[in-house]
Amino acid sequence: GDGRKCAVAFEQMDSFKCAQVVERGTPEVMVLVVERMKSTKAADMLKHCLLNKAGAVMSLMAPEKCGSMIDLMEAEWTAGVLDGVSANQVAAALERVTDKEVAACVMEAMQPAVATKILEAMEEKSVTKFLM
């Protein structure tokens, strides 16, 4: 259906119920809904989704939206979700996270090999920001 209408309905629904709907839907449709939801509600809902489903949705998101969601999530959970998302996309999202400490915590929670790939995908100025 219409992403905007769904988003409005989701805002009123319980996060757990929303998550069940998202898990049954295709990531391509669900990302349209999630991108129109308020970030706080969307983050809360994604927490209830299976990691791979949440990852599939986040991998289709605009980096800005993805970054604003990461700001609101627990670092360890985020690291698990982003595990299945391409390094380039994670790099782009983390570069847009407003709280650099949150982004750094996410990186710390990742497998070293994954974190390395992400750092390699980032722009140099972002890497230096993380390592300061």
Image (spheres, grey):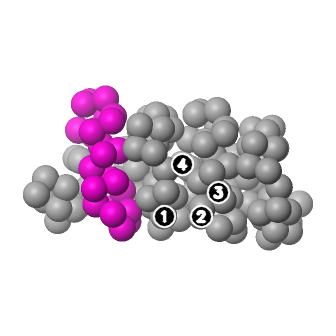
Picture quarter containing residue 49?
top right
Answer few, some or many: residues within 10 Å of disc 2's Cα (few below 14, many 20 plus, some between 14 and 19): some
Question: Residue 111 location, x and y as percent?
Answer: 31, 29
Q: Which residue is mark 2?
A: 39
Whether residue 31 is visible = yes
* Of labels 4 and 1, the one closer to you: 1
Is 60 on the left or on the right of 72, as rendered? right
* Of labels 4 and 2, the one closer to you: 2
Q: Earlier in the sequence, mark 3 or mark 4?
A: 3
Q: Which residue is mark 3?
A: 42
User: Front-most of 85 and 107?
Assistant: 107
Q: Which residue corresponds to the image point at 59% horizontal and 64% vertical from the top-left? A: 39
Q: Which residue corresponds to the image point at 77% horizontal and 63% vertical from the top-left? A: 11
* Of labels 3 and 4, the one closer to you: 3
Q: Amino acid at mark 3?
A: Ala
Quadrant for the C terminus, please: bottom left
Picture quarter containing residue 48?
top right
Q: Earlier in the sequence, mark 4 or mark 2?
A: 2
Q: Which residue is mark 4?
A: 59
